[in-house]
């Protein structure tokens, strides 16, 4: 493989990987954080069971998520009419399902502790449920951002589900992880290593961002 | 303006299987400053929380006339500070009500000696500063009833004097203050009435002069030790 196409392929695949995982994590955060907060401030029968189910869903095997989503999105499946199979949207959907329980559960843990601290004040001030949730999310934003970054780390490194629902189609649904598996199977180890190196750089960047966030918080709260 | 009045009937506060308070049955219109006194673990905090609605009674009910829950404020024994600046802490009660805050925040901070700390991250405040912040935040909405649980526990002498001055000013404006305190001297200085709480039982309010000159039997031993 010549150098110029290799670099352009690498850039294209990397950008697609980032676009899929960033979109998935933003969507999962938009749903998971408010849900975790709602769970933290609301008392109802079955709440403990709901939290237990949420925690259990964190361990969902991605391959199974991919398989179920494949069955749902395939032409004969109930969601086949959406025509999403083998598109980046199917991959985003798979990643949302994988990281949503992680974000919701971590958010719930963080916000439950903060709620224990703030409860008397917010109830005393007559804050509505929506206001309570907003105050909690705002004041826990640093910890929540950490949860979101952790979820991004999981999403960007995921391969099983997106391989099944994305199909690893060149210039369409191929991302870093699926490309690595393909290039290894083809024996094209040079390109596989280059792809792997980009994945490692992304992981390192996430770790450094987490570290910088925690350092910035110690020096000057924001 | 109708003077605030509360009626409590057969109210019980429990934590798990442990009964913390009650059954409580009484009705009273709080005096300008009412001291809630009693030994440690007597149920004073539970009583304040019950009155303010932070504790839901397992049985019975608490009904206020002349002061809705939104017209009441509560300052707990351990000040709760939001993970925000002092300014944002003070502004929160007004923001939740959709009211403008800048002028009132500045005024409130000045009153409690917090002006220089307005941009400080509130969790970094000392215990005494946090307690002054909690009091300023409780007063900023102009409550009709103010519940204070040991509000001067972490304060130095100048801080304590300033807070007591403010409580007297607030009472003179018509705010009804219910103040949990262990300090007999403080209760003698400030209180117009005393509610005695012991062993989870709440005794009806007595005028402070009567309470200290001729204390009920249940309180006599405690007062003699102080």
Image (spheres, rainbow, N blue to C red):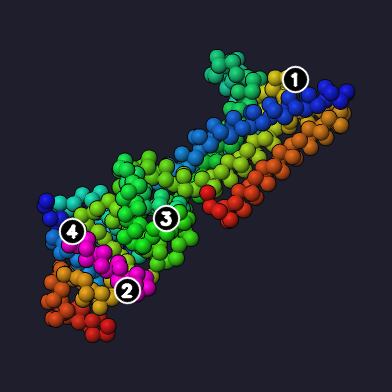
Residue at image coords 61%, 24%? A90
Q: Of the residues under marks 2 and 4, which one precedes in the sequence?
A: 2
Residue at mark 1 shares a chain with residue at mark 3: no
Q: Is residue B151 above or below residue A50?
A: below
The chain ID associated with circle 4 is: B
- Closer to the camera: disc 3 or disc 2? 3
Mark 2 is surrounded, within 10 Å at the Cα level, by few (under 14), some (14 to 19) or many (20 or more) other residues, namely few
Residue at mark 2 shares a chain with residue at mark 4: yes
Q: Is residue B25 above or below residue A128?
A: below
Q: Do the residues under discs 1 and 4 have CB atoms within 8 angstroms?
A: no
Describe the element under mark 3 as helix, strand or loop: loop
Numbered range of the magenta stretch: B155-172
Q: Determine the main secondary structure of the stretch shown in magenta.
A: helix
State how far apart marks 3 and 2 are (Cα).
35 Å
Q: Of the residues under marks 3 and 4, which one precedes in the sequence?
A: 3
Residue A170: assigned label: 1
Q: Residue A150 location, x and y as percent?
A: 62, 43
């Amino acid at each position: 493989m010549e150098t110029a196409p290799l670099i352009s392929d690498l850039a294209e695949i990397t950008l697609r990987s980032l676009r899929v995982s960033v979109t998935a994590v933003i969507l999962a955060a938009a749903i998971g954080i408010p849900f975790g907060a709602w769970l933290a401030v609301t008392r109802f029968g079955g709440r403990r069971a709901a939290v237990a189910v949420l925690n259990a869903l964190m361990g969902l095997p991605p391959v199974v998520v991919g398989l179920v989503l494949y069955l749902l999105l395939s032409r004969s499946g109930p969601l086949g009419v959406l025509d999403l199979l083998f598109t980046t949207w199917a991959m985003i959907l798979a990643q949302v399902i994988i990281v949503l329980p992680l974000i919701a559960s971590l958010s719930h843990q963080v916000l439950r502790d903060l709620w224990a601290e703030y409860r008397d004040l917010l109830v005393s001030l007559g804050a509505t449920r929506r206001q309570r949730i907003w105050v909690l999310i705002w004041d826990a934003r640093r910890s929540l951002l950490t949860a979101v970054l952790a979820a991004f780390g999981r999403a960007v490194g995921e391969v099983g589900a997106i391989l099944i629902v994305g199909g690893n189609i060149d210039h369409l649904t191929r991302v870093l992880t699926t490309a690595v598996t393909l290039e290894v199977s083809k024996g094209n180890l040079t390109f596989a290593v280059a792809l792997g190196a980009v994945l490692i750089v992304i992981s390192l960047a996430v770790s450094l961002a987490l570290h910088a966030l925690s350092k910035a918080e110690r020096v000057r709260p924001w | 303006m109708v003077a605030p009045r509360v009626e409590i009937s057969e109210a019980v506060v429990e934590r798990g299987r442990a009964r913390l308070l009650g059954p409580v049955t009484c009705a009273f219109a709080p005096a300008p400053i009412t001291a809630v006194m009693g030994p440690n673990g007597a149920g004073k905090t539970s009583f304040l929380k019950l009155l303010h609605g932070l504790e839901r009674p397992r049985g019975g009910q608490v009904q206020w006339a002349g002061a809705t829950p939104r017209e009441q404020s509560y300052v707990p024994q351990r000040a709760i500070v939001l993970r925000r600046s002092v300014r944002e802490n003070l502004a929160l009660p007004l923001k939740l009500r959709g009211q403008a805050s800048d002028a009132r925040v500045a005024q409130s901070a000045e009153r409690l000696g917090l002006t220089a700390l307005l941009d400080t991250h509130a969790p970094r405040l000392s215990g005494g500063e946090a307690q002054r912040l909690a009091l300023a935040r409780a007063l900023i909405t102009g409550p009709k009833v103010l519940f204070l649980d040991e509000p001067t526990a972490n304060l130095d002498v100048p801080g304590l004097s300033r807070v007591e001055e403010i409580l007297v000013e607030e009472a003179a404006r018509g705010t009804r203050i219910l103040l949990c305190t262990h300090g007999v001297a403080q209760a003698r200085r400030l209180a117009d009435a005393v509610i005695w709480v012991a062993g989870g039982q709440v005794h009806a309010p007595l005028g402070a002069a009567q309470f200290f000159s001729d204390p009920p039997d249940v309180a006599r031993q405690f007062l003699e030790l102080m």
